[in-house]
Amino acid sequence: MTKEYQDLQHLDNEENDHQLRKVPSPPQPLLLRLCSGPRLLLLSMSLSILLLVVICVIGVQNSKLKEEMHALREMVSNFTQTTEVKVKDLNIQGESVGRKMKSLESQVEKQQHDLKEDHVSLLFHVKQFLFDLRGLSCQMAVLQGNASEKACCPVNWVEYEGSCYWFSRSGKPWPEANNYCQLENAHLVVVSSMEEQKFVQHHTGPVNTWIGLTDQNGPWRWVDGSDYEKGFKNWRPDQPDDWHGHGLGGGEDCAHFTDDGRWNDDFCQRPYRWVCETGLERTS
């Protein structure tokens, strides 16, 4: 009896358990279902694949971007080099043009200077020719006995601006040259202007030539008494210096033309050429 009761009770329990199993379980949330076992693994794999694809795409894009940047850098570099070469060529051409322009300017200035000098020289020669022609006419009149009251320079003397000049072709010491001019009723040349300087220099040429300027008896003075301090001067730089180093005794007390026409003081006993000067009125 007891065993049957136990069997019945056991059957009841099985029925109750069967009924309990038949009751449906409550629905689970979506996130819980997605995160459950296989779904979670599948989701992780999908996300990993997606991330891998994104990384690949970014990598490809980055590689393309690097190539484009490299190509752009090369293009900029080539453009810069080409520009620098062109700028350098333009600078060289500009410098060449500048040098040519300066050369042309120098040539034009030189030609203008030469033309001006030629013009001055031509005027001087024309003026001198007129003086010579007048002197020659005067001398011809004297020789023919038809001299007018107008004075003229002696034979072999050159007229210029109311004076007559004689140019030696040999050398003498300054005192002897001065005595020679006095014997000719003249004196060593007294240079009173740049025009007279050029006239005398034209006839003497580039040789040392005594002029009538000395300081043998004190300060510098002209032999005709002209005012030295206020008058025309054409000394070389640092002259006169009364140099005693020539070893000839004494200093330098007599003035002369140098090869370029400027004046220098020198030892008076040197044998230089000389120029005599006298006025037209003194030759009549």
Image (cartoon, rainbow, N blue to C red):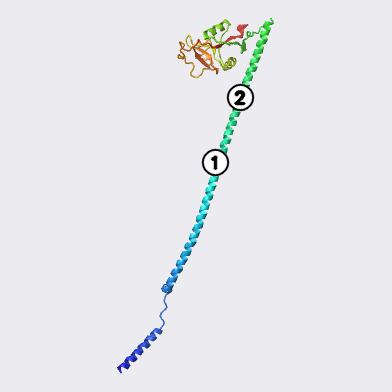
| Mark 2, residue position | 114
User: Quadrant of the image for the C terminus?
Assistant: top right
Frontmost residue, 209 versus 240: 209
Q: How many marks?
A: 2
Foreground pick, 233 / 104: 104
Q: Which amino acid type is shown beneath numbered disc 2?
A: Asp
Residue at left 57%, top 37%?
94
> Which residue matches tag 1?
88
Q: Residue 280, how many percent across, how many down?
A: 61, 9
Comparing 160 with 39, the one in front is 39
- In front of the other: label 2 or label 1? 1
Q: Earlier in the sequence, mark 2 or mark 1?
A: 1
- For label 2, the SS is helix
Under circle 1, the secondary element is helix
- One can see residue 66 in this view: yes
| Residue contact between numbered discs 2 and 1, judged by CB atoms under 8 Å | no
Seen in the image, is 7 located left or right of residue 69?
left
Figure quadrant of residue 168: top right
Q: Amino acid at mark 1?
A: Lys
Residue 154 location in percent, x, y? Answer: 63, 8
- Quarter holding residue 141: top right
For residue 147, say whether it is visible: no
Whole-percent x and y of residue 173? 52, 9
Q: Residues within 10 Å of mark 2 (few under 14, many from 20)?
A: few
Q: Residues within 10 Å of mark 1 (few under 14, many from 20)?
A: few
Q: Position of residue 65 (x, y in %)?
A: 51, 56
Residue placed at 44% from the left, 70% from the top? 43
